[in-house]
Image (cartoon, helix red, strand yellow):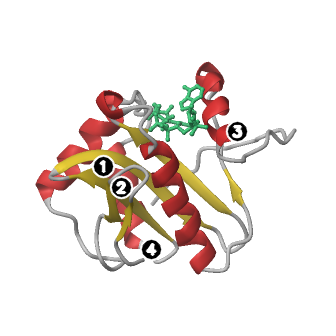
Amino acid sequence: MTETLRPASALRIAPIVSAPGEVADAATIDAVIALWQRCNLTRPWNDPLADLRFALASPMSTVLLGHRGDRLVASVMVGHDGHRGVVYYVAVDPEFGRQGHGRAIMAAAEDWLAERGVPKLNLMIRTENAAVAAFYEALGYQIEERVVMAKRLKAS
Ligand SMILES: CC(C)(COP(=O)(O)OP(=O)(O)OC[C@H]1O[C@@H](n2cnc3c(N)ncnc32)[C@H](O)[C@@H]1OP(=O)(O)O)[C@@H](O)C(=O)NCCC(=O)NCCS
């Protein structure tokens, strides 16, 4: 994805690395994980660094970052499985909330998927964070009645 400037939010949005398999620099990684922590998106059972590295290793996923000047303000992990798109770690620094940055980083994720021919984006909201559905609804997302099932696998 080419770097885009979305005037509505004044965010400079670009992938964390310019090509799959590239390694992000340590300061950027630290800033991204700190943002996720500030946004209450990390959980003890998920290793955010491993999540980040895994997303960057594949051409089917990436992490987009939104900066204002040098300051990291927003992130989204976006990927697809060959059928549907998905986003994780949708985050806007609370100090910069309600300025259109969430809308802008989600639009960039949608563009990333659309450029790869992905026709639909699915996302999950943790039950304790259900109020955030209003944010996604403002962006045109609808609640679809599905039962999500999951199983932890032993990653090699
Ligand atoms: C959710 C989040 C990304 C929103 O970012 P943001 O930059 O404040 O959102 P925006 O300013 O782009 O808002 C876009 C629209 O959503 C609405 N909106 C944003 N947050 C909202 C909320 N908590 N409740 C209701 N509406 C909300 C805004 O009113 C706006 O609508 P408008 O453009 O029609 O006025 C941000 O609050 C965040 O990082 N939250 C913590 C992490 C999180 O919960 N991520 C989602 C995990 S599923």
> Disc 2 to disc 4, how far (Cα)?
11 Å
Disc number placed over residue 58 in the picture, else none: 4
Q: What's the residue at 40%, 27% (across, down)?
A: 40
**N-terminal-most mark, 3 or 4:** 4
Amino acid type of the residue that numbered disc 2 sits on in the rendered structure: Leu
Point out the tag, 2 or 4, that comes first from the N-terminus: 2
Residue at mark 2: 52
The image's mark for residue 90 is none
> Which residue is at the far right?
145
Q: Which residue is found at the position 55% from the left and 69% from the top? A: 111
Query: From mark 3 to mark 4, how far is it between C-alphas?
Result: 30 Å
Kind of residue sitting beneath label 3: Glu
> Does the residue at mark 3 contact the one at mark 1 (Cβ under 8 Å)?
no
Q: Secondary structure at mark 1?
A: helix
**SS type, badge 3:** helix
Residue receiving disc 3: 137
**Residue 154 visible in the snapshot:** no
